[in-house]
């Protein structure tokens, strides 16, 4: 009798184990530098709600905005140890996972339009997603956040003007800091959350930034001058750890894929509108926008040419960078016919 009871108990445990795993609660904890209430935040919330309904009871989706989980390097490290499991990152943060992603953003003055950006990204998308997956991260969507422009506390237009400033660089990006130093620039590495205090105290006096983030961060209230030059396209994307992805139900994964594509399209479309809207809003509260003459543009292109050798095979993978540049050239060739 005792043996029969033990056998029935063991059978019940074996049957209950798969059920317990099936009912395991899945919680997505996503971090981003994007401001609370922004287009990015709202799109992520919509994506998460659609996923939560498909994943089922007990699932949860939390977005940590405004860099409350640290800089992007910190966020990537937290995902690797399981404290977070998803993030909306710029190319800087994604490059912490795989340096190939930087090829989309780090080449200065590469793109002339968003059509070129889209064409180049689609050409290398599958390769980048495979490389990120091999390193434990699933790409949910790709996005962008406007053009990088240069801001300064005092009037500055030419590259030589900015050599007299103390320029912000992203904390942890040692390669970028060393390169700029070698070109005669004074650089100060800081996290994004420290930019405004740095400007206010004079710790930094210039910075490259997207117009939307400059407006949201109120950088223009101190750095009241901007060069009207599209230095680079701000690129990025949302990723989730492969471990959590595999823990989801098939319905949850399918819905998250669909919702993520919708979120990415919404972010790209709205961010491009907000880029110019932000410039106009900052002009209304005192920003001086300095136009770029052909002569000045040629000077900036000389700087870009100096940057390129440091990037290829250094900051970013040479094969991806070559593919991105080839895609831009291919697009322009098609448009010229």
Image (cartoon, rainbow, N blue to C red):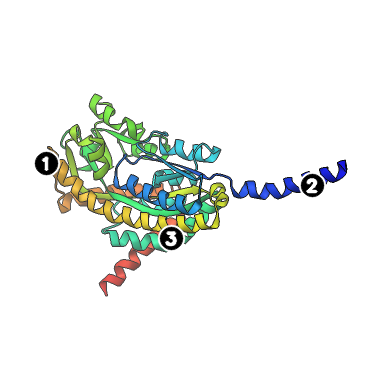
Q: Is mark 1 on a helix, strand or loop?
A: helix
Most foreground residue, 252 or 229: 252
Measured in 3D between alpha carbons, the distance from the residue under mark 1 to the one under mark 3, in whole angstroms, is 39 Å
Q: What residue is at 49 percent from the left and 39 percent from the top?
A: 84
Q: What residue is at 66 percent from the left and 50 percent from the top?
A: 18
Identify residue for label 3.
124
Along the horizontal axis of the image, is 260 left or right of 271? right
Along the horizontal axis of the image, is 66 left or right of 273? right
Comparing marks 3 and 2, which lies closer to the viewer? 2
Identify residue for label 1.
284
Along the horizontal axis of the image, is 155 left or right of 261? left
Which is more N-terminal, label 3 or label 1?
A: 3
Q: What residue is at 85 percent from the left and 46 percent from the top?
A: 4
Most foreground residue, 76 or 307: 76
Q: Position of residue 5 (x, y in %)?
A: 82, 43
Q: Where is residue 158 in the image (x, y as percent from the top left)?
A: 19, 43
Comparing marks 2 and 1, which lies closer to the viewer? 2
Q: Position of residue 124 (x, y in %)?
A: 43, 60
Q: What residue is at 88 percent from the left and 43 percent from the top?
A: 1
Most foreground residue, 297 or 323: 323
* Category of crowding for the residue at label 1, using alpha-carbon neighbours closer than 10 angstroms: few (below 14), some (14–19), many (at least 20): few
Measured in 3D between alpha carbons, the distance from the residue under mark 2 to the one under mark 1, in whole angstroms, is 76 Å
* Category of crowding for the residue at label 2, using alpha-carbon neighbours closer than 10 angstroms: few (below 14), some (14–19), many (at least 20): few
Along the horizontal axis of the image, is 96 left or right of 282? right
Identify residue for label 2.
8
């Amino acid at each position: 009798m005792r043996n029969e009871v033990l056998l029935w108990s063991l059978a019940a445990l074996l049957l209950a184990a798969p059920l317990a795993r099936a009912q395991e609660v899945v919680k997505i904890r996503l971090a981003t530098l994007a401001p609370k209430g922004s287009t990015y935040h709202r799109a992520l919330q919509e994506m998460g709600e659609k996923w939560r309904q498909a994943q089922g009871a007990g699932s949860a989706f939390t977005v940590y905005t405004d860099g409350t989980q640290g800089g992007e390097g910190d966020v990537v490290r937290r995902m690797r140890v399981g404290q977070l499991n998803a993030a909306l990152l710029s190319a800087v943060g994604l490059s912490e996972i795989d340096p190939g992603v930087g090829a989309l953003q780090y080449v200065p003055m590469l793109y002339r339009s968003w059509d070129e950006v889209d064409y180049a990204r689609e050409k290398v998308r599958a390769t980048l997603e495979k490389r990120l997956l091999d390193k434990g991260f699933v790409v949910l969507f790709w996005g962008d956040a406007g053009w990088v422009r240069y801001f300064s506390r005092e009037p500055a237009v030419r590259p030589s003007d900015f050599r007299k400033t103390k320029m912000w660089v992203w904390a942890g990006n040692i390669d970028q800091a060393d390169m700029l130093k070698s070109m005669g620039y004074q650089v100060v590495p800081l996290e994004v959350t420290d930019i405004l205090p740095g400007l206010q105290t004079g710790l930094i006096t210039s910075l490259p930034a997207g117009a939307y983030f400059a407006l949201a961060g109120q950088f223009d209230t101190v750095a009241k001058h901007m060069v009207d030059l599209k230095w680079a396209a701000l690129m990025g994307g949302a990723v989730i750890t492969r471990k959590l992805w595999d823990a989801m139900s098939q319905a949850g994964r399918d819905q998250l894929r669909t919702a993520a594509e919708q979120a990415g399209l919404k972010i790209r479309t709205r961010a491009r509108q907000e880029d110019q809207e932000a410039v106009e809003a900052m002009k209304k509260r005192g920003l001086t926008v300095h136009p770029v003459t052909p002569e000045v543009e040629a000077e900036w292109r000389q700087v870009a040419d100096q940057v390129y050798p440091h990037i290829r095979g250094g900051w970013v993978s040479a094969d991806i960078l070559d593919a991105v540049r080839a895609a831009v050239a291919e697009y322009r060739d098609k448009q010229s016919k």
